[in-house]
Image: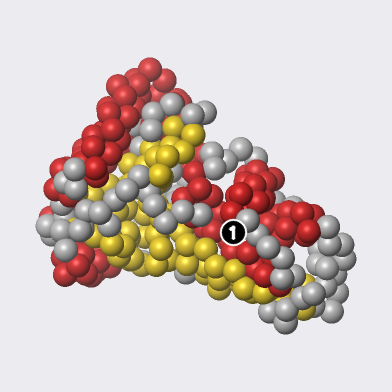
Amino acid sequence: MTKKVGVGQAHSKIILIGEHAVVYGYPAISLPLLEVEVTCKVVPADRPWRLYEEDTLSMAVYASLEHLNIKDACIRCEIDSAIPEKRGMGSSAAISIAAIRAVFDYYEADLPHDVLEILVNRAEMIAHMNPSGLDAKTCLSDQPIRFIKNVGFTELEMDLSAYLVIADTGVYGHTREAIQVVQNKGKDALPFLHALGELTQKAEDAISQKDAEGLGQILSQAHLHLKEIGVSSPESDSLVETALSHGALGAKMSGGGLGGCIIALADNLIQAQDLAERLEEKGAVQTWIESL
Protein backbone atom coordinates (compact mmCIF):
# COMPACT_ATOMS: atom_id res chain seq x y z
CA MET A 1 0.00 0.00 0.00
CA THR A 2 1.13 3.53 -0.77
CA LYS A 3 -0.24 6.99 -0.25
CA LYS A 4 -0.43 9.62 -2.96
CA VAL A 5 1.96 11.74 -0.91
CA GLY A 6 4.25 10.79 1.96
CA VAL A 7 5.22 13.60 4.32
CA GLY A 8 8.02 13.87 6.87
CA GLN A 9 9.26 16.76 8.98
CA ALA A 10 12.25 17.47 11.21
CA HIS A 11 13.65 20.40 13.16
CA SER A 12 17.16 21.82 13.29
CA LYS A 13 19.73 22.30 16.08
CA ILE A 14 22.43 24.63 17.31
CA ILE A 15 25.46 24.11 19.54
CA LEU A 16 25.06 26.02 22.79
CA ILE A 17 28.58 25.43 24.06
CA GLY A 18 31.47 22.98 23.82
CA GLU A 19 32.31 23.05 20.12
CA HIS A 20 35.92 22.08 19.34
CA ALA A 21 36.58 21.02 22.93
CA VAL A 22 34.21 18.12 22.28
CA VAL A 23 36.69 16.74 19.73
CA TYR A 24 39.16 16.31 22.61
CA GLY A 25 36.83 14.50 25.00
CA TYR A 26 35.15 17.43 26.74
CA PRO A 27 31.34 17.73 26.85
CA ALA A 28 29.21 19.78 24.47
CA ILE A 29 25.59 20.88 24.75
CA SER A 30 23.36 21.06 21.69
CA LEU A 31 19.87 22.56 21.51
CA PRO A 32 16.94 21.55 19.30
CA LEU A 33 15.49 24.45 17.33
CA LEU A 34 11.88 23.38 17.17
CA GLU A 35 10.73 26.36 15.10
CA VAL A 36 13.26 25.93 12.27
CA GLU A 37 12.07 22.99 10.19
CA VAL A 38 12.42 21.04 6.97
CA THR A 39 9.59 19.17 5.24
CA CYS A 40 10.07 16.34 2.76
CA LYS A 41 7.34 15.06 0.45
CA VAL A 42 7.58 11.74 -1.37
CA VAL A 43 5.42 11.57 -4.49
CA PRO A 44 5.00 9.11 -7.37
CA ALA A 45 7.40 9.34 -10.31
CA ASP A 46 7.38 7.88 -13.81
CA ARG A 47 10.81 6.32 -13.41
CA PRO A 48 12.61 4.37 -10.65
CA TRP A 49 14.44 6.34 -8.00
CA ARG A 50 18.24 6.32 -8.33
CA LEU A 51 20.97 6.60 -5.71
CA TYR A 52 23.31 9.59 -5.88
CA GLU A 53 26.28 8.96 -3.61
CA GLU A 54 27.46 11.57 -1.11
CA ASP A 55 24.07 13.26 -1.18
CA THR A 56 22.40 13.16 2.23
CA LEU A 57 18.84 13.08 0.89
CA SER A 58 19.71 10.29 -1.51
CA MET A 59 21.40 8.26 1.22
CA ALA A 60 18.40 8.66 3.53
CA VAL A 61 16.00 7.45 0.84
CA TYR A 62 18.33 4.57 0.00
CA ALA A 63 18.56 3.48 3.66
CA SER A 64 14.76 3.63 3.97
CA LEU A 65 14.04 1.62 0.83
CA GLU A 66 16.68 -0.95 1.76
CA HIS A 67 15.12 -1.38 5.22
CA LEU A 68 11.66 -1.76 3.68
CA ASN A 69 13.05 -4.15 1.03
CA ILE A 70 11.56 -2.10 -1.79
CA LYS A 71 13.30 -2.22 -5.18
CA ASP A 72 12.75 -0.04 -8.25
CA ALA A 73 10.70 2.48 -6.28
CA CYS A 74 9.06 4.94 -8.65
CA ILE A 75 9.21 7.93 -6.33
CA ARG A 76 10.80 11.34 -6.07
CA CYS A 77 11.37 13.73 -3.16
CA GLU A 78 10.47 17.38 -2.76
CA ILE A 79 12.27 19.35 -0.03
CA ASP A 80 11.06 22.56 1.59
CA SER A 81 13.65 23.67 4.12
CA ALA A 82 14.02 26.72 6.37
CA ILE A 83 17.40 25.41 7.55
CA PRO A 84 20.41 26.97 5.81
CA GLU A 85 23.20 24.62 4.78
CA LYS A 86 26.71 24.67 6.26
CA ARG A 87 25.75 26.90 9.18
CA GLY A 88 26.03 24.40 12.02
CA MET A 89 22.25 23.99 12.27
CA GLY A 90 22.04 20.31 11.41
CA SER A 91 20.62 20.73 7.91
CA SER A 92 21.95 17.39 6.70
CA ALA A 93 20.65 15.38 9.66
CA ALA A 94 17.27 17.13 9.57
CA ILE A 95 16.85 16.42 5.86
CA SER A 96 17.73 12.77 6.49
CA ILE A 97 15.13 12.50 9.25
CA ALA A 98 12.42 14.21 7.21
CA ALA A 99 13.15 12.06 4.16
CA ILE A 100 13.08 8.79 6.09
CA ARG A 101 9.81 9.76 7.75
CA ALA A 102 8.36 10.70 4.35
CA VAL A 103 9.36 7.40 2.71
CA PHE A 104 7.86 5.36 5.55
CA ASP A 105 4.73 7.52 5.46
CA TYR A 106 4.41 7.04 1.69
CA TYR A 107 4.55 3.26 2.05
CA GLU A 108 2.33 3.38 5.16
CA ALA A 109 4.97 1.54 7.18
CA ASP A 110 5.51 1.82 10.93
CA LEU A 111 8.67 3.68 11.92
CA PRO A 112 9.79 3.04 15.52
CA HIS A 113 12.09 5.69 16.97
CA ASP A 114 15.03 3.30 17.32
CA VAL A 115 14.75 2.29 13.65
CA LEU A 116 14.59 5.95 12.61
CA GLU A 117 17.72 6.73 14.60
CA ILE A 118 19.61 3.79 13.10
CA LEU A 119 18.64 4.78 9.55
CA VAL A 120 19.52 8.45 10.08
CA ASN A 121 22.94 7.57 11.44
CA ARG A 122 23.48 5.14 8.56
CA ALA A 123 22.65 7.82 6.01
CA GLU A 124 24.84 10.37 7.79
CA MET A 125 27.69 7.87 8.05
CA ILE A 126 27.66 7.16 4.33
CA ALA A 127 27.37 10.83 3.37
CA HIS A 128 29.79 12.27 5.93
CA MET A 129 32.11 9.35 6.73
CA ASN A 130 32.42 9.81 10.51
CA PRO A 131 29.77 12.04 12.09
CA SER A 132 29.54 12.23 15.89
CA GLY A 133 25.81 11.57 15.82
CA LEU A 134 25.14 14.75 17.80
CA ASP A 135 23.27 16.47 14.97
CA ALA A 136 21.01 13.47 14.43
CA LYS A 137 20.40 12.99 18.15
CA THR A 138 19.46 16.65 18.67
CA CYS A 139 17.29 16.85 15.57
CA LEU A 140 15.42 13.80 16.88
CA SER A 141 14.90 15.27 20.36
CA ASP A 142 12.85 18.08 21.84
CA GLN A 143 15.31 18.41 24.75
CA PRO A 144 18.88 19.76 24.94
CA ILE A 145 21.52 17.08 24.47
CA ARG A 146 24.79 16.72 26.38
CA PHE A 147 27.39 14.78 24.44
CA ILE A 148 30.82 13.38 25.25
CA LYS A 149 32.80 11.67 22.51
CA ASN A 150 33.02 7.88 22.97
CA VAL A 151 30.79 8.14 26.05
CA GLY A 152 27.35 9.04 24.73
CA PHE A 153 24.35 11.33 24.98
CA THR A 154 22.22 12.61 27.85
CA GLU A 155 19.02 14.65 27.61
CA LEU A 156 18.92 17.77 29.78
CA GLU A 157 15.93 19.65 31.12
CA MET A 158 15.88 23.37 30.37
CA ASP A 159 13.41 25.98 31.59
CA LEU A 160 15.23 29.31 31.73
CA SER A 161 12.38 31.67 30.85
CA ALA A 162 14.86 33.22 28.44
CA TYR A 163 15.25 33.38 24.67
CA LEU A 164 18.03 32.47 22.29
CA VAL A 165 18.63 34.51 19.16
CA ILE A 166 20.41 32.69 16.36
CA ALA A 167 21.95 34.88 13.67
CA ASP A 168 23.38 33.68 10.36
CA THR A 169 26.56 35.51 9.35
CA GLY A 170 25.88 34.66 5.73
CA VAL A 171 29.24 32.88 5.52
CA TYR A 172 29.49 29.11 5.22
CA GLY A 173 30.98 27.45 8.28
CA HIS A 174 34.19 25.51 7.65
CA THR A 175 34.30 22.84 10.33
CA ARG A 176 37.09 20.68 8.90
CA GLU A 177 39.35 23.68 8.33
CA ALA A 178 38.62 25.00 11.82
CA ILE A 179 39.45 21.64 13.41
CA GLN A 180 42.74 21.70 11.49
CA VAL A 181 43.46 25.21 12.80
CA VAL A 182 43.14 23.90 16.36
CA GLN A 183 45.26 20.84 15.61
CA ASN A 184 47.98 23.03 14.13
CA LYS A 185 48.22 24.97 17.40
CA GLY A 186 49.18 21.77 19.17
CA LYS A 187 49.78 22.11 22.89
CA ASP A 188 49.19 25.87 22.74
CA ALA A 189 45.47 25.16 22.27
CA LEU A 190 45.18 22.82 25.26
CA PRO A 191 44.60 25.47 27.99
CA PHE A 192 41.80 27.01 25.94
CA LEU A 193 40.19 23.63 25.25
CA HIS A 194 40.36 22.78 28.95
CA ALA A 195 38.77 26.12 29.81
CA LEU A 196 36.01 25.48 27.26
CA GLY A 197 35.38 22.09 28.84
CA GLU A 198 35.04 23.68 32.27
CA LEU A 199 32.70 26.34 30.89
CA THR A 200 30.44 23.64 29.45
CA GLN A 201 30.11 22.09 32.90
CA LYS A 202 29.37 25.52 34.37
CA ALA A 203 26.77 26.06 31.65
CA GLU A 204 25.09 22.80 32.59
CA ASP A 205 25.03 23.93 36.23
CA ALA A 206 23.54 27.30 35.24
CA ILE A 207 20.85 25.54 33.22
CA SER A 208 19.91 23.29 36.15
CA GLN A 209 19.79 26.35 38.45
CA LYS A 210 17.73 28.32 35.90
CA ASP A 211 20.40 31.03 35.95
CA ALA A 212 20.06 32.75 32.58
CA GLU A 213 22.34 35.64 33.55
CA GLY A 214 25.09 33.27 34.63
CA LEU A 215 24.69 31.24 31.45
CA GLY A 216 25.04 34.39 29.38
CA GLN A 217 28.35 35.26 31.02
CA ILE A 218 29.59 31.73 30.38
CA LEU A 219 28.68 31.94 26.69
CA SER A 220 30.60 35.20 26.30
CA GLN A 221 33.66 33.71 27.99
CA ALA A 222 33.47 30.71 25.67
CA HIS A 223 33.49 33.00 22.64
CA LEU A 224 36.71 34.64 23.81
CA HIS A 225 38.41 31.25 24.08
CA LEU A 226 37.14 30.17 20.66
CA LYS A 227 38.45 33.42 19.25
CA GLU A 228 41.84 32.79 20.87
CA ILE A 229 42.22 29.39 19.21
CA GLY A 230 41.45 30.93 15.83
CA VAL A 231 38.09 29.43 14.91
CA SER A 232 35.91 32.53 14.98
CA SER A 233 35.58 34.96 12.07
CA PRO A 234 35.34 38.75 11.64
CA GLU A 235 31.66 38.40 10.78
CA SER A 236 30.95 36.35 13.90
CA ASP A 237 32.96 38.68 16.13
CA SER A 238 31.09 41.69 14.78
CA LEU A 239 27.69 40.15 15.46
CA VAL A 240 28.74 39.01 18.95
CA GLU A 241 29.91 42.53 19.77
CA THR A 242 26.65 43.95 18.42
CA ALA A 243 24.58 41.61 20.58
CA LEU A 244 26.56 42.40 23.73
CA SER A 245 26.45 46.15 23.12
CA HIS A 246 22.66 45.97 22.84
CA GLY A 247 21.96 44.19 26.09
CA ALA A 248 22.38 40.48 25.40
CA LEU A 249 23.06 38.42 28.51
CA GLY A 250 25.82 36.74 26.53
CA ALA A 251 26.80 35.84 22.99
CA LYS A 252 29.18 33.56 21.11
CA MET A 253 29.90 31.91 17.80
CA SER A 254 28.29 28.49 17.40
CA GLY A 255 29.40 25.37 15.59
CA GLY A 256 32.54 24.60 13.63
CA GLY A 257 33.43 28.22 13.05
CA LEU A 258 35.17 30.32 10.40
CA GLY A 259 31.65 31.44 9.54
CA GLY A 260 28.24 29.99 10.32
CA CYS A 261 26.03 31.36 13.08
CA ILE A 262 26.28 33.20 16.36
CA ILE A 263 23.92 32.89 19.30
CA ALA A 264 22.85 35.55 21.78
CA LEU A 265 20.93 35.04 25.02
CA ALA A 266 18.08 37.46 25.79
CA ASP A 267 16.22 37.94 29.05
CA ASN A 268 12.79 38.24 27.42
CA LEU A 269 11.03 38.09 24.06
CA ILE A 270 10.99 41.85 23.48
CA GLN A 271 14.74 42.02 24.02
CA ALA A 272 15.23 39.00 21.76
CA GLN A 273 13.23 40.67 18.98
CA ASP A 274 15.26 43.87 19.39
CA LEU A 275 18.52 41.92 19.26
CA ALA A 276 17.40 40.10 16.12
CA GLU A 277 16.63 43.44 14.46
CA ARG A 278 19.98 44.92 15.51
CA LEU A 279 21.87 41.89 14.26
CA GLU A 280 20.15 42.03 10.87
CA GLU A 281 21.01 45.72 10.64
CA LYS A 282 24.63 44.77 11.30
CA GLY A 283 24.69 42.21 8.50
CA ALA A 284 23.07 38.99 9.70
CA VAL A 285 21.29 37.52 6.67
CA GLN A 286 18.68 35.77 8.80
CA THR A 287 17.74 35.43 12.47
CA TRP A 288 15.62 33.05 14.50
CA ILE A 289 14.32 33.21 18.07
CA GLU A 290 13.94 30.12 20.24
CA SER A 291 12.34 29.98 23.68
CA LEU A 292 14.49 28.34 26.33
Q: Quadrant of residue 190?
A: top left
Residue 150 location in percent, x, y? 52, 28
- Please tell me how crowded label 1 is: few (under 14), some (14-19), or many (20+) other residues with Cα within 10 Å: many
Q: What's the residue at 49%, 34% (across, down)?
A: 152
Extreme bottom residue here? 4
- Amino acid type at image mark 1: Ile
Q: Circle 1 sits in a helix, a strand or a loop, which is it?
A: helix
Residue 140 location in percent, x, y? 51, 54
* Rendering colour mode: secondary structure
Horizontal placement of 2 versus 229: left or right? right
Q: Quadrant of residue 185?
A: top left
Q: Which residue is mark 1?
A: 97
Residue 55 location in percent, x, y? 68, 56
Establish if 253 lies above or below 180: below
Q: Quadrant of residue 271?
A: bottom left
Horizontal placement of 18 versus 54: left or right? left
Count of numbered circles in the view: 1
Horizontal placement of 5 versus 231: left or right? right
Q: Residue 131: in sight, yes or no?
A: yes
Q: Looking at the image, which is closer to me, 109 or 145?
A: 109
Q: Looking at the image, which is closer to me, 165 or 281?
A: 165
Quadrant (top left, top right, bottom left, bottom right) of the N terminus? bottom right
Q: What's the residue at 71%, 70% (across, down)?
A: 108
Q: What's the residue at 59%, 64% (across, down)?
A: 98
Q: Residue 242: in sight, yes or no?
A: no
Residue 97 location in percent, x, y? 59, 59
Quadrant (top left, top right, bottom left, bottom right) of the C terminus? bottom left
Q: Looking at the image, which is closer to me, 217 or 277?
A: 217
Q: What's the residue at 25%, 54% (across, down)?
A: 159
